[in-house]
Image (cartoon, rainbow, N blue to C red):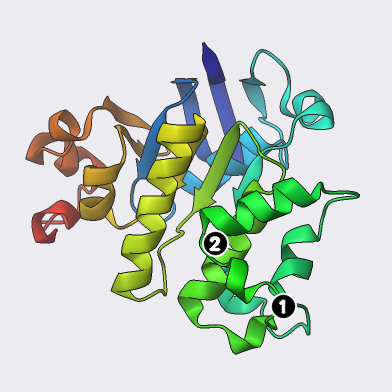
Amino acid sequence: MKAISLTNVYYSFDSIFVLENINLEIEEGCYLGIIGPNGAGKTTLLRLILGIIKPHRGQVLIYGQNPEDYIKSEPIGYLPQRISQTIYEFPVTVEELVKSGYEKIKKENLDWALDVFKISHLRKKILRELSGGERQKAFLARAIASQPRILLLDEPTTGIDPYSMEELLKMLEILNRDFGITILVVTHDIGTFAHEARCILCLNRRVVCLGEPQKILKDEYMAMLYPESTVFPHKNA
């Protein structure tokens, strides 16, 4: 079943195309890593899927519906870039953070989200008392507390220590494998997600290539994705 589809999608900013002729179909249950240089349109792609912005041309569908219609009845989990590093001074507890943004959340959903990211013991802790990795888990718990079918993550491993990163990746694997959540991850950490994601999308305003990591992360594709580089990111993984 197609969870997400984009057909002939264009998006421009100040008359400059950020995304051009994007044709993409993402199956339900996919774990997709999205890579590309700065300015490639990766975050814009997530915002189009979320319905935060609309394409200037083309069509975006979530389970056959426009994003704004889909979200009226079904949530999409979303973790914006660097949110846990920029918003943590508010005097709220982990539990209050996870509840925020929802008119009403079932206790079992709240408990499930905290359990998935192994932070139930931190539920009464104030955000600023947490480590960077713990804060990231709290924001991720908030993103899944509605038990969405789709989860979009923008650079989720940025700014956290290696141990927290390893834990986070294991938890994402569980969400995808055991709960069937479709996961899209924007990342510069190509080497790590080459081992985690089932599929890699190489994006540079256009779809450069899409496929299994072992087929995609080759020099000919990386040269198209990073045309000005002689050292490709995956080489140092």
Would residue 14 be seen by someone viewing this image from the given angle?
no
Is 162 situated above or below 45? below
Any part of residue 45 in sight: yes
Check if mark 2's residue and mark 1's residue have beta carbons within 8 Å.
no
Residue at 61% from the left image edge and 66% from the top image edge: 120
* x, y percent for residue 25: 47, 18
**Residue farthest along the right direction in this orientation:** 103
- Counting the numbered discs, the total is 2
Q: Earlier in the sequence, mark 2 or mark 1?
A: 2
Amino acid marked by disc 1: Lys
Q: Give the label, 2 or 1, closer to the camera.
A: 1
Q: Is residue 36 above or below residue 117?
A: above
- In this view of the protein, which residue sits in the foreground, 132 or 94? 94
Residue that appears at 72% across and 78% down: 124
Q: Position of residue 112 (x, y in %)?
A: 63, 50
In the displayed structure, 228 sits above or below 225; it is below
Q: Is residue 189 above or below residue 48?
A: below
User: Which element type, helix, strand or loop, lies under badge 1?
Assistant: loop
How far apart in space, not on screen, are marks 2 and 1 (Cα)?
A: 25 Å
Q: Looking at the picture, how far across and down is residue 225, in whole percent?
A: 25, 42
What residue does disc 1 label? 124
Query: Hey, what amino acid is under mark 2?
Result: Gln
Q: For label 1, count other residues whose C-alpha is less than 10 Å away and answer few (under 14), some (14-19) or many (20+).
A: few
In front here: 235 or 97?
A: 97
Q: Residue at x 45, y 58 (%)?
A: 155
Residue positioned most to the bottom: 129
Q: Quadrant of the C terminus?
A: bottom left
Which residue is painted at 15% across and 43% down in the image?
223
Residue wearing tag 2: 81
